[in-house]
Image: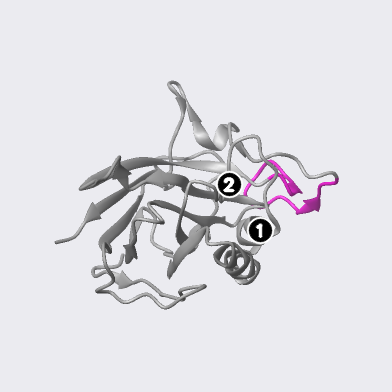
Amino acid sequence: MLNRPIFALILMLGSALSVAAEGAQRYRLTLHYAWSAASHPVDFPADAHMAGLFGVTHDARYVLFRDGNTASSGVILMAENGRNTVLLAEWSEAARRKRVGVVFEAPGTSTQPGSVVVEFDALPEFPFVSFAAMIAPSPDWFTGAASVALRDGAVWRDRITVPLWAWDAGSAGGESYTADRVDMQPRQSVRLLAGPQFLDQDGLRSMGQAVLTRLP
């Protein structure tokens, strides 16, 4: 478990951002993974771990993933292999169109349950944040949150808590963590995972929660 924040990898895809930039707000994102053999006993893999976390601030036009949409190539590569090379290319293009701001990342964790902490800056023109991490091992499963609003109108929110659900990227067949990856053509849409691994008597069981805290 990490015990200190990992600071944002500020790639500023478009124009340089100073920490002192006008209107910039500093946020800490903490992911509390409540995913373990005790909480999710069905089919839980012996080598379970969460891959690295990748995130971006953006405007209302950009969508990292959405229930019912087809996943981008970058999201698919992240969900299948835990890599962000294609995501970075997609974010670079989105930055050229002035749709995204700061990119950040943090290492994964092999401790389950566990937590990951990262800090990043947000500007008024990019008041949303999205992030995702591969559930490993898995065919193409991931967790995260998309288009979380950091502002309520013109006011920056001090604390935001969102659930972390398990998602299927729709690119590979397989109904268990260690199932052989079979390429799906045509691609299926992104959807919440509702298999026995993520269900209990009350319905879908989350992977934990994410907490966003505005820093002084």
Foreground of the two, 45 or 154? 154
* Residue farthest right in this picture: 185
- Nearest-to-viewer mark from 2 and 1: 2
Question: Which residue lies at the image location 31% right of the left edge and 77% below the top edge?
Answer: 18
Rendered-image quadrant of the N terminus: bottom left
Magenta portion: prevailing SS class: loop
Query: Vertically, is 61 above or below 21?
Result: above
Q: Earlier in the sequence, mark 2 or mark 1?
A: 2
Q: Across the whole image, how many numbered discs are drawn on residues?
A: 2
> Residue 135: x and y, percent?
54, 54
> Considering only vertical position in the picture, is 142 above or below 14?
above
* Secondary structure beneath label 1: helix
Three-letter code for the amino acid on which mark 2 is drawn: Phe
Residue type for callout 1: Glu
Residue segment shown in magenta: 170-185
Magenta stretch encompasses residue 35: no
Q: Of all residues shown, which one is farthest toward the top? A: 201
Q: CA distance from mark 2 to mark 1?
A: 15 Å
Compared across the picture, whether 99 is left or right of 77 comes to: left
The residue carrying pointer 2 sits among few (fewer than 14), some (14 to 19) or many (20 or more) residues within 10 Å by Cα, namely many
Query: In the rendered image, is residue 123 in sight?
Result: yes
In this view, 9 is above or below 197 = below
The colour mode here is one colour
Left or right? Give the position of 117 relative to 129. Answer: left
- Tell me, for residue 5, which label it has, or none: none
Q: What residue is disc 1 on?
A: 80
Q: Which residue is mark 2?
A: 65
| Mark 1 neighbour density, 10 Å: few (under 14) some (14–19) many (20 or more) | many
* 73 lies left or right of 120: right
Name the spot of residue 6 as percent of width and height, x first.
Answer: 32, 72
Label 2 sits on a secondary structure element that is loop
